[in-house]
Amino acid sequence: MQNKIDLSSALDAKTEQLSIINQFSSSLLQLDKLDELFNYVTTEVVKRLGFVDCVIYIADETATTLHEVASMGVSPANSNYSIERKTIAFNQGITGYVASTGRAVIIGDVSTNSRYIADVHPAMSELCVPLIYKQQVLGVIDCEHPLRNYFSDAHLEILTTVAHLLSAKINQVNTVENLQQTVSQLNAAQKLEGTLLQIANLTYQANDLDTFLEALHSIMTNLLRADNFLVGLYNKSIDILDIVYLVEEGVRSNAHKKISKEQLKHTASYYLLNSERSLLLNKKEYQQHINDGHFKMVGRQSESWLGVPFKASDQMSGVIVIQSYDKTHHYNNHDRTLLTYVSRQISMAIDRQLSRQALEHRALHDELTGLANRSLLIDRIKHGILRLTRTPKGRYHALLYLDFDRFKSINDSLGHEVGDHFLIAICKLIKDTIRNTDTFARLGGDEFAIFMENITHKNQVNDALKRIKKVLAEPLNIDGHLLQASTSIGVAFCENENDKAYQLLQHADTAMYEAKSTGRGQVKFFNNTMRKKLKSHADIENDLQHGIEHHEFELYYQPIFAIQQCHVVGFEALVRWHHPRKGFVSPNDFISIAENTGQIINLDLHLLDLAGKQIAAWQQQGKRFLRVTVNVSSRHFASIDFISHIHAIYNKYQLALGSLCLEITESGLIENLELATKIIEGLAPLKVMLCLDDFGTGYSSLGYLHQLPIHVLKIDKSFIDRLKDNATPLVDAILSLALSLKLDVVAEGIETQEQLIILQKTQCDFGQGFLKARPLPADQAILLIDKPL
């Protein structure tokens, strides 16, 4: 009978045990937060098992220390249950021993156990089981009781099972939390990457700094909270901080604030600029800097302050500062890294803007003088003309066109560096005489212009002219050279909104050339006479191409003869234009216009073709070999295509080698000597000779003689006119030079027998001039070749 009772009691105990375990298992499955798990286990252990306390300790990451995470127990009346030991080292006490060994213990009498350490509520017996998952100790469940031998094997079995269930659940929750954290980190990383990409794209797309900073701030709010957001640019040269973007407590300030050094030196921003390192400060640290005298309090103190300095250019640095007034929101090192990245983007954006501004400035200003260039001047003139529609009557604009006298001779004799310094000095003097509203521009070389807007009386222009003349009256010391500056000035007015910028420039230019033609330092105002002349030039320009296409041009031929025997050796071909309305038009009236407009290229090629055709006709008539020289522009020696043009003419008319030759003037000598030499050498197989006209009237002839393969020199008529009793020293020098360089010499402009006799006593080879023959039509010129002139 006794056995039946024991068996029944054991069965009831086992059923209760399984019920407890089943309840734990079911409840643990429903919980997914660790603190809820721990609180549930400690509460239920005390409640279901009748223990007086239960404490759960969890091991730290290093598995060297246990930390209390939940505790439950029965306390004396009117007091809350608590434990004294919140932290226990592995191997410390019974609890630490279980953690280090991973084995559960039941101690019936703790007074006999040397490991026992008494807590707030001393105990007599203790049950401690480890929390283990896959052989890793996660922590322990520790239970104590004031009675000896209280804990049974059944208790151990239940608590061990609960420990297994809890360990598995801890791992599950940790795994889920780790996964969630990983997903969260990935999402955050993706969001960060997207935001940084947005900022980078913005940096390279934004053209305006204000727009860039506003868009940047909007993007940044996805990552950083900034109750206050400030971007300041510090100009070292003027010692001023310009607050280019400011948001205070969420409100954007549109006005730029400029802070002088006197105000700036007390601010945290200035401290940041000088320290050249980022600062992350909480409220206490910020106050400490104030106490240390690093800066003063400006505005309301923030809970968290983060600032990063950056360099924008050689002359400019900057700061970006964010502040939080929320006690729950403090910046961290991650925020510091992010703001440092943002500061670099701002630096790049500013650098791009400064570079763009520099490019725009270079595109609209002269590099040497810093003045406006032609493009900017024309733009200002156009806007000025438009403003005439809104200006009171009686107001108009004036354009002064300046050309510095003798500048070329200074460049040629003293060098381009002195010439450049001379121009800079003159421009500085003139700039100081004009109004701030006037536009002073360099048009190229030694030509400048001053655009004066809103003139009410012509005297304002006269006064400006007097001021310019006065500042240029005294000689200038340029690099040790005493140089006198003077300028020829043309003036034109604009008073109608229908006027055109290019016309105003053209009128002033025309007036300037009139002034220059009357002597140095003169001033001319554009007038009706000049207007008619311009009209004539415009008509000629329009008619030139028509004349080429309709065969209005004819070549006349002036003989070139041997000085001693006076027999004809060749001709110089000279152009004549038979205009259908104007009749004969002098070359002086259209060659310069053709040169200025570029039409000279087509005209020259047309005349070369006419000359080639005439030479071929004479050859077919059986006439003896004669050279025909055609004047061409130096523009042809800037294009390698000129070689093919001359070869084409020789092939087209099957010309004898050397029968068609070229002549250029010294005043139009070639700038690109290397290319010109290639072109002349490319014509060598045709035996084309190059003749240099007007020799001795320019500044650089000797240099060209050495560098270009020139074959013939023509002594300018101005030197031949001086021949009276004997050859002049200059003519003798030219002849000696030509002899040493093995060049033929042609004396042009021989008009008297006396001049011819003098030349016959020299080593001059050839001559031409009215004394023997004027330019003649082809059919008359060819009649002169059979007998001495």
Image (cartoon, rainbow, N blue to C red):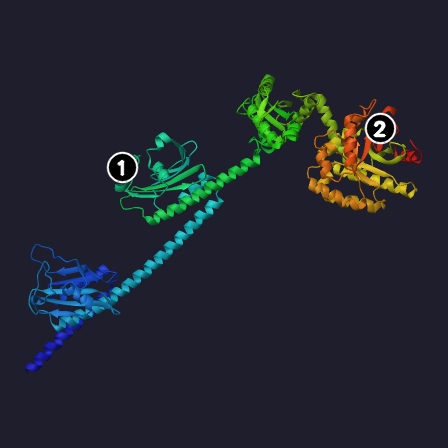
Q: Local crowd at mark 2 within 10 Å, few (<14), some, or many (≥20)?
A: many
Left or right, 745 with reference to 92: right
| Label 2: element kind | helix
User: What number is the disc on residue 103?
Assistant: none
Q: Residue furthest top?
A: 459
Q: Is residue 456 visible?
A: no
Q: Give the residue drawn at x 70%, y 35%.
A: 703
Circle 1 or circle 2, nearest the eye: 2
Comparing 403 with 549, the one in front is: 403
- The part of the image, by quadrant, that contains residue 371 is top right
The picture places residue 342, in percent across and down from the top left corner, at 40, 45
Between the C-alphas of marks 1 and 2, the distance is: 98 Å
Comparing 735 with 462, the one in front is: 735
Q: Is residue 779 visible?
A: yes
- The part of the image, by quadrant, that contains residue 174 is bottom left
- 475 up-or-down from 144: above or below: above
| Label 1: element kind | loop
Left or right, 299 with reference to 404: left
Task: Tell me the kind of residue under disc 1.
Answer: Asp
The picture places residue 581, in percent across and down from the top left corner, at 81, 29
Task: Tell me the kind of residue under disc 2.
Answer: Leu
Q: How many marks?
A: 2
User: What number is the disc on residue 292?
Assistant: 1
The picture places residue 505, in percent across and down from the top left corner, at 64, 28
Q: Are marks 1 and 2 in contact (CB under 8 Å)?
A: no
Residue under numbered circle 2: 759
- 36 up-or-down from 753: above or below: below
Of labels 1 and 2, earlier in sequence is 1
Comparing 497 with 424, the one in front is: 424
